[in-house]
Amino acid sequence: MTSSLCINKGSKHKTVQVLGKAVENLSGYQPLKHMNISQYIATNVLSLKEFVKPSTKMQHGKSTLRAISSAMVLLQRYEFKTNHEDWFNTTKPRIGIDISSQVLAAVNSTQDDIKSLYKMRLELRSALNKLLKDDGILIIPTVTEFPFKRDSRKKITPDIEDHLHALLSIAGMSGCCQITVPLGKHESYPISISYIAAHGADKFLLDTVLDMYSSLQEQITIASNLVPTPDTNGDMDASELLKEKAEADCSQALLLDKKNVKAYLRRGTAREMLLCYKEALEDFKHALVLEPQNKDAVDAEKRLRKLMA
């Protein structure tokens, strides 16, 4: 069985370690492969461009997820209105305030681009089926940011709702099957991961999660009893920020000079440390185009190809 892994930061180090160890202890499983799922979707779902809102402040990956989420909500409203509008207007059911606002938004909605919504659903499903095939699992965080702390009374704003829908919409829009598994807590925040399999592979997904669950729980227990190993600067979160800053600085340098080999090498190294292997490999390949005999780039490319194999 093959697994692709896409985990957000925050508890990333421990989560990746726990999953990797859990898979290592099982027979018949290939090592985890890291990927940028937003980039994969943006490349393979061409109709998604119609729903991407231009924004200079939003990262490309986030804009892709936001577009899928927006399309999913529009399609859900259309289907709810088509199937339940008469019942809602006739019965006038008593429902909670939060739900009623969503129901009214659906009943009062008008959609002119239904065909493009269904087209995007089919393209997304096809892209994920191509990626996962019959024996692949995509493992992602359940939400893009930390969820609310337990018993939190924080109000769910539209912006928070967008964050909640972002990753859930991958399976929700494509019709692929998804299972969410709790991992415990990170600094009082509940942490979970979601397993996604191809459309129609429900039994395979259930069997896989059941197969992995004991090993996963064992590794969670081991990890929770370990004293965290700090990075060289003594602070994991600060280290992550430094890597991201190095990546951003190099990107800025490359805007000024697209032949800056050192910038490609530095950015590639930062991306590799952030587990963005595909993007790191592209940077090292760019460096080799500019300097074919560059030993650092040659070694880095070989190393990454082994990691991604």
Image: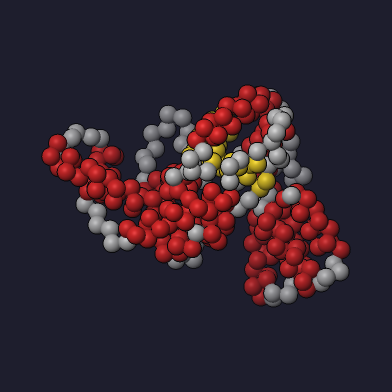
Q: Nearer the viewer, residue 189 or 274?
A: 274
Residue at the spot 38% in from the left edge and 55% down from the top edge: 118
Is 304 left, or right, of 96 in this rendering? right
Which quarter shows the N terminus? top right
Residue 248 visible, this angle: yes
Is 67 left, or right, of 32 in this rendering? left
Counting every numbered tag in the picture gives 0
Residue at the spot 69% in from the left edge and 74% down from the top edge: 258
Q: Position of residue 278 (x, y in %)?
A: 67, 56
Q: Nearer the viewer, residue 28 or 142?
A: 28
Residue at the spot 69% in from the left edge and 53% down from the top edge: 277
Give the color scheme: rainbow, by chain, secondary structure or one colour: secondary structure
Is 274 left, or right, of 117 in this rendering? right
Q: Position of residue 179 (x, y in %)?
A: 50, 35
Q: Classify 51 as above or below 231.
A: below
Q: Residue furthest left?
A: 90
Q: Position of residue 55 (x, y in %)?
A: 46, 64
Q: Classify 304 as above or below 229.
A: below
Question: Which image quadrant for residue 151?
Answer: top left
Q: Position of residue 263 (x, y in %)?
A: 73, 67
Residue 242 visible, this angle: no
Q: Nearer the viewer, residue 272 or 302?
A: 302
Residue at the spot 53% in from the left edge and 50% down from the top edge: 128
Q: Classify 28 as above or below 104.
A: above
